[in-house]
Each structure stands twice: as C-alpha cells, then as structure tokens.
Amino acid sequence: MLDKDFAHDLSRLAVVALMALVLGLTGCKVQTSASGKDDKTDTAPEAVPVEVASVARRAIAASYAGTAALEARGEAQVVAKTSGIALQVLVDVGQHVKAGQTLLRIDRDRATLQAAQASSQVGKLEANYRRAVQLAEQKMVSANDVDQLRFDLANAREQLRMAQLELSYGNVTAPISGVIASRDIKPGNFVQINSPIFTVVDTSRLEATLNVPEREIETIKPGQPVDLAIDALPGRSFAGTVDRVAPVVDAGSGTFRVIVAFDGNDALQPGMFGRIRIRYDQRADARVIPREALLDDGGNPAVFVVRAGKVTRTAVQLGYDDGPWVEVRTGLKDGDQVVVAGKAALRDGSAVNVLTTAPAKPAATTAAPTQDAR
C-alpha cells in the first residue's frame, strides 16, 4: 500500500514540475516579444537638424573677376645730363613734386666760365660784323670777308647756346608730376652723367592689366564699372572703370588684355595686389539663393527644399553669379526654404528639424570679386 502512495506522489510532483516549465517558457516568450517591440521603437529614424534660408529677390550683377597688381600710369627715371658734385638735394622720398620742379643742384662753376667765354666771343664777333658791314658799303671790305664774319658770328652764337644749355643741366628737374619713389643721391656725392638719381611715379591714376579669356570679348567694354578689393586694406572697396580693351586675342594664351583704371588716393599704392571685378550687366529684381545652398556633388545644380518637415532634392537652373548670391532661373519660387547648413547628412525625403532660418537680406555692395558669371 505504501508503494502505491509513493508512486502517486511522484506522479503529482512530475505534473507540477511540467506545468512550471511550461509557464516559465511562456513568460520568456512574452518578455522576449516585449523586448523586441521596444528595440524596434528605439531604432526609428530621427529628424536631422538643419538651417535654412528663404528664396528672395534682390539686385544681382553679372561680372568677370580677376587679380592683378596696380601700376602707376606714369613713371620716370630722373637722370643727370651732366657730371659734377651734388650741391643741394631739394626733395626726398614720398614728397609730391610738379613737372619742371628743381630736384637737385649740381656744381656748375666750369660751365659758368664756359658760358661767359662764349658770350664774350659773340660780343666780339657782333662788333666786327657791324664794322665790316659799314666798310663793305664804302667798298673797303670784300663781300667774302663780310660773309665769313657772318658765319663766324652764327657759329659763336650756337656755341653760346650750347654753353648755356650745359649750364642749365646743373638744375635737375622733374619730368612729370608725381611722388618721389626713390632717391639715389646725397649732398656732396659726385653725379655721373646719365646715371639715375630719382624715380618719380604719377599716382594720380593707377592701372591694372587683366588677361581675360576670349569668350568674354563681347561682354567687356570700355567704361564699364569696376570694383577693387585689396587684401592689405580689408573692409575697403575702390571704384574704377574699364579704360582700354585690346582688340587682339593672343593666339598662344587665348586671352586679350583689359586695362582698368582707378583714381589715385593716399590708400592705393603702385605694386599693391588686388582682386578686381568687372560688372558688365545687372538685374534689378532677380530670384536668388545663398551660394551655400547649392549641393556640391558634381552633378547638375540642385538644392534641398524643405516641405512639410521633409526635404526634396530639387534641380535648379542658375543665372548670374554675384559673390554670396546666385540667381535661380527655374526650379524654385519666392519664399521656398532651402537648406544652407546640414546638407551632408540629408537624402531625398529625409525628415528635418529646422533650427534657424537665415534672413534673406539684400547684401551690401562689396568689392570682393566673384567667379565668372554664367
């Protein structure tokens, strides 16, 4: 009887253990399913933070940009036309001078004596010639003698002019108006004939020469406005004009020369390197976007447009290119919001979170050149 009861108890324990095992497996399955559901919720895509700008309208210019060094329109090397000791140096570097102003005085004692001798000789021959004419009227002097005296007198007068010219070389004068750029003489130095002693530059008008591709030959014309920016003078811009355009294209380089001119002032100096923009056309009411909104993927021009919390890759046709702005001919309308920051993390249809909207203010006029307008 005991054996039967013991067997019955074992059977009951086995049933309880089996039920516990089933319940445990069922709980694990439920927990695993719940855990899987949570993981799926955690991997949902998040919105990409971006900054946008609104499509707006403003004036925009078509331009050609280049770089060149400024040159003085006039420059002269002042040389001595005679030799001698420098008695007085009347100007120094940086001083403004006028054409004909005396810059240097050279010792002219010898030339003064030679001019005095030539003057005396002329006086003597003039007296002899007058007497010879009177005697010739009385038939006391031959006509040949009178002619000889006349020739001698003319020659003496030329010698006097030569001596006076040599004497005048003692005052070295400025050939042009401008600024003394260099001085290579000091008082007491010996001046060699034809040796350069001063450099005078005319800074009243400065020029720069651009070698422009031949495709622009129909667009660049004399009189067009020019903007100049100098790296050494940040924050300042200078206005000029196209002065001359060479009508011949260089066959080797495929370029033609364009000379632009600027009025001189105390800031601009010859030798400064500048960035130059020639504005050859302008639209007063163009639809524009910031340049930074364009996608840099090497394909056709496109932007990301934000609509209903997502971005759409939109192809655009560009017009004029003006510094930080580009004209959009087709593809966008006024007020559209284009992504200007955060583009790298976006794909067509990505959800976005707009952080800020850059105001589309009309940009102030700047002299910083742009890329070639197309």
Image (cartoon, rainbow, N blue to C red):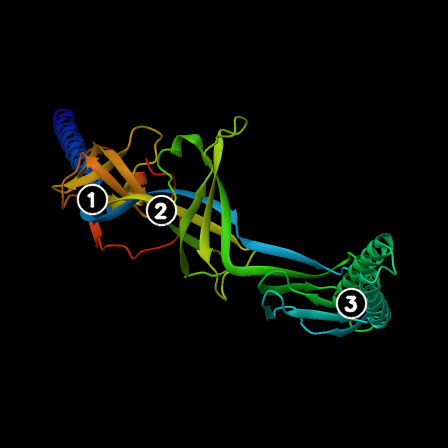
How many badges with numbers are in the image? 3
- Residue closer to the observer: 10 or 81: 81
Q: Using the rendered image of the protein, determine whether residue 43 is visible from the camera's viewpoint.
A: no
Q: What residue sits right under mark 1 in the picture? A: 286
Q: What residue sits right under mark 3 in the picture? A: 167
Q: What residue sits right under mark 2 in the picture? A: 224
At label 3, which amino acid type do we have?
A: Leu
* Secondary structure of the residue carrying numbered label 2: loop
Residue drawn at the location 80% of the way across and 61% of the way down: 137
For marks 3 and 2 on the same chain, the one whose residue lies earlier in the sequence: 3
Q: Nearer the viewer, mark 3 or mark 2?
A: 3
Label 1 crowd (10 A; few <14 / some 14-19 / many >=20): some
At label 2, which amino acid type do we have?
A: Gln
At label 1, which amino acid type do we have?
A: Ala
Label 2 crowd (10 A; few <14 / some 14-19 / many >=20): some
Disc 3 + disc 1, Cβ < 8 Å? no
Q: What distance separates the C-alpha of mark 3 from that of mark 2?
A: 50 Å
The percent position of residue 152, horizontal first and vertical second, equals 84, 58
The percent position of residue 11, horizontal first and vertical second, equals 14, 26
